[in-house]
Image: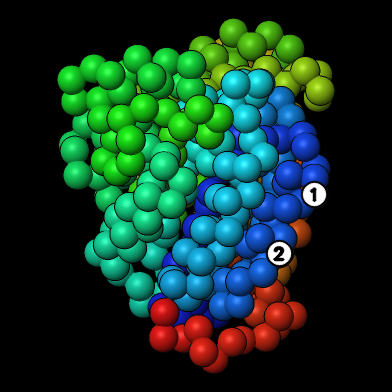
Amino acid sequence: MDDLRLESFVECVPNFSEGADTTTLDLIAGAIDSSTGAWLLDHSADPDHGRSVYTLAGYPGRVMSAMDAAVAVAVERIDMRTHAGHHPRIGAVDVIPFVPLGDTTMEQCVAGARSFAERLADRFDMPVFLYREAAVKPERRVLAAVRRPGFDGLAQAMARDGGAPDFGPSRPHPTAGATAIGARPFLIAWNIQLTSTDVTVAQRIAARIRERDGGMVAVQALGIELPSQGCVQLSMNILDFERAPLWQVWAEADRLAAQERVSLLDSELIGLAPARALADVADHIGSASFHTAEQRLHEAAGHLRIRRFDPSMVLEVRLAQARGQGGDDASSRSD
């Protein structure tokens, strides 16, 4: 799987503050899919989180054109004044990260993210904050710090000294709030469900496993209740799977769960994972080198109990499939 070429591509993983309105979610997907040279690879929605996550990849200019169209749908249809959901958020288009793939450099992603942020702020009269590698203020490198006020506290936070956005007005958009745009390395959004209905159990485990509170490096975690599933969840972002291998995070979550007298039920990928992250799990569990790449992916997923795993959950596989189905637009190669 690792030998699939990614060329000079970027990945974008926008998060929208809507998890239940299928009409809105389908319109966003259609807007992304309408751009040639950018391929919609994955989409998941969670009504408990009040959130949907899309994964698209392709030639940089085409990816940004697709995001222009998707943001227009979200700003028109999502009203943060009536939004409900457990996940932290500051806006209808809560976060837009750009990720370098193939020959694309992080510096190119940073420049593209900043240019796109300025364009978005002007078009929608909406405040935009830059984060992670695209940040121009050190205190905004961490997304959680940007998002800390939430939509309800956004106006007050922006009115304080130093609270103005990087682009756009110094007040939230009345219905769409604000947006965070950044450039970052590949992030794996990965959730582990626990055999418990007590959200405080998940919150204690999250506090002990995340880097911010002295836990595992490159791990962000929240404990979240999932009423529709009758359990609680360890909702995580793995910021660097080389420093925090998935097998190691699973083992630590299992250890902490045992201390709480609960166990790990299963896990789920939100979006896609790179082939190397699962290959590392396969190596750890001793998957035979003579097994096919697909067999090794399944063995890794089985160890992590990933729900409904399919090789198309792997970025390289999904992109190859999408390009094969949609064909390539040669004119997009100059973007």
Dot 1, crowdedness within 10 Å: few (<14), some or many (≥20)? few
In the figure, 291 relative to 202: above or below? Answer: below
The answer to whether one can see residue 113 in this image is no
Name which residue lies at 42% across and 39% down: 126
Whole-percent x, y for residue 203 in the image: 54, 14
Which colour scheme appears in the figure?
rainbow
Residue corresponding to mark 2? 312
Residue tagged by mark 1?
308
Residue 78: quarter of image:
top right
Residue type at mark 2?
A: Ser
Viewer-proximal residue among 224 and 70: 70
Q: Which residue lies furthest to the bottom in this view?
A: 330
* Relative depth, front residue between 162 and 315: 162
Image quadrant containing the N terminus: bottom right
Q: How far apart are marks 2 and 1 (CA)?
A: 11 Å
Other-residue count near label 2 (Cα within 10 Å), few / some / many at <14 / 14–19 / ≥20: some
Q: Residue at x 29, y 67 (%)?
A: 108
Q: Is mark 1 on a helix, strand or loop?
A: loop
Within the image, what quadrant is residue 22 found in? top right
Residue 216 location (% of width, % of height) = 39, 32
Q: Where is residue 200 in the image (x, y as percent from the top left)?
A: 59, 8
Report the front residue among 189 and 121.
121
Q: Which residue is drawn at 48% across and 22% down?
A: 151
Name the amino acid type tagged 1.
Answer: Arg
The image shows residue 92, relative to residue 209, as above or below, that is below
Element type at mark 2 = helix
List x then y, in percent, for residue 196: 72, 14
Relative side of 331 to 125, left or right:
right
Q: On screen, 310 above or below 240?
A: below
Image quadrant containing the C terminus = bottom left
Residue 73 visible at all: yes
